[in-house]
Image (spheres, helix red, strand yellow):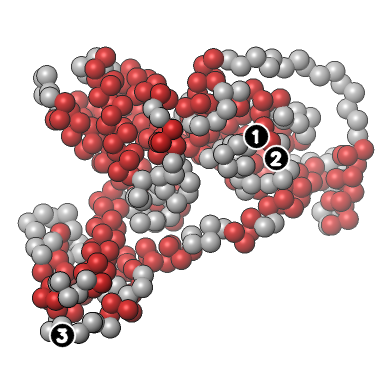
Amino acid sequence: MRLPGTRYQEHGWEQVRKLLGQCSLAAFAQAPLPSLDDYVEAVAAALVQVGRRFDTPGNSDGDSVRDLALSLLYELQARPGDWDAFCATVPRDPGEALLRKKVNDMYATLRDKVDADNYQVACGRPCSPNRIYAYRMLDTAYHEIARLFTDWRSHAVQVGAILNRAIDAAPIEARQMQTIAGCRPEWILRWSASCAGPLHTRSKRFDALKDNPVKIGAMLQEIAEYDTLSANRDADWRLDAGDATLWLDDYWRVMAAPEPEAAGPDRILEAHQDALDVVDEAPETPVDTAIDPAAGALAASVSLPPGFIQMARLAQDRHSWAARMMVDDGLPVRLAVYAKLTGPEDDAYPDAWCDPATGALPTMQQLAVLAGVSLPTLRKRRDAAIARLMAAART
């Protein structure tokens, strides 16, 4: 299931959950109940050591299972209340099975909190972890109904209950329901009734959906609409990504000129040509090219070359207007700004800025790890840098 802003609701979650459980047990083997900081450090180190099989995509955005696990681990560090709640439920000397279950429960709750927060940022609409859980339940129900429709001969009684009629031949609905958009709310309700499902238990978790086909229909359509919107992976505007980078750099240069003129096409092209003709004779500050072991391990933990940070810094044009305006921002923040404003892929980006596996700038999740901050914190710093650029361009 895909929803705006979410990352942990797709096929890779089970692998993420298992990986975090495996590395958590390794951390608890070192200390029965460590502090949150010690736990995060131990699990992060374990995640670095796991095999490359965890570098496979864990969602439709291409985030690897390892990246997703690291990001959720750092989200936990930013939410100490979840860690405290976990510690409060762990008995003295728990067995391995119970400890793994408690860890799984902690991360299962955390993933819905994180995705609910990111959904709100992406859509501007309120969303709770319980609502994310409800979306997931409806998506699961749709796939189960689709399975029953496909194998209707083996489940004729239940399919008849769902469609509210006797089934003696292949139901036309089996052909009509090609996506979740074709799933009717009343089918969800009847399916749940036919198997004592989630809408027909004593749990109050889905009270807002019980006997409410209108609300169920709206949520099904939202899932379907985002599936359609994200199907082409923004392929259309990525065709213009190369032109966008040059235009943006020229835009900043023109806007920052002492006596700016109208930023028409001729003025922008002239500014770009002037910049190409300028030779800056100021002496270069030597840059240390040695690979720092800690930085190398950090880069490797998110599947980047060990020398990524050093080489990316060397590749920067430190005399460009944008670089001078962001001189106090770290490299991960600057790369996040470029990815936000001109897209993650562009021929104008130096190779040293890009992840060799994708040919694009590192993902926000990778950059957050490189910066040593949580994903929300990196977003805030990126947006603050963009706001400063905008303000400077207007002055």
> Gap between marks 3 and 1, in whole Å?
61 Å
Residue 141 placement (x, y as % from top left): 23, 63
Q: Secondary structure at mark 3?
A: loop
**Which residue corresponds to the image point at 87% horizontal and 39% vertical from the top-left?**
275
Q: Give the residue at mark 1.
A: 353
Is residue 130 depicted above or below 300 in this figure?
A: below
Determine crowd level at label 3: few under 14, some 14-19, many 20+ residues with C-alpha closer than 10 A: few
Q: Residue at x 10, y 69 (%)?
A: 194
Q: Earlier in the sequence, mark 2 or mark 3?
A: 3
- Mark 3 is on which residue type? Asp
Residue flagged by tag 1: what amino acid is it? Trp
Disc ID at residue 168: 3
Q: Which mark is residue 349?
A: 2
- Quadrant (top left, top right, bottom left, bottom right) of the C terminus: top right
Give the mark toward the camera: 3 or 1.
3
Mark 1 and mark 2 in contact (Cβ < 8 Å)? yes
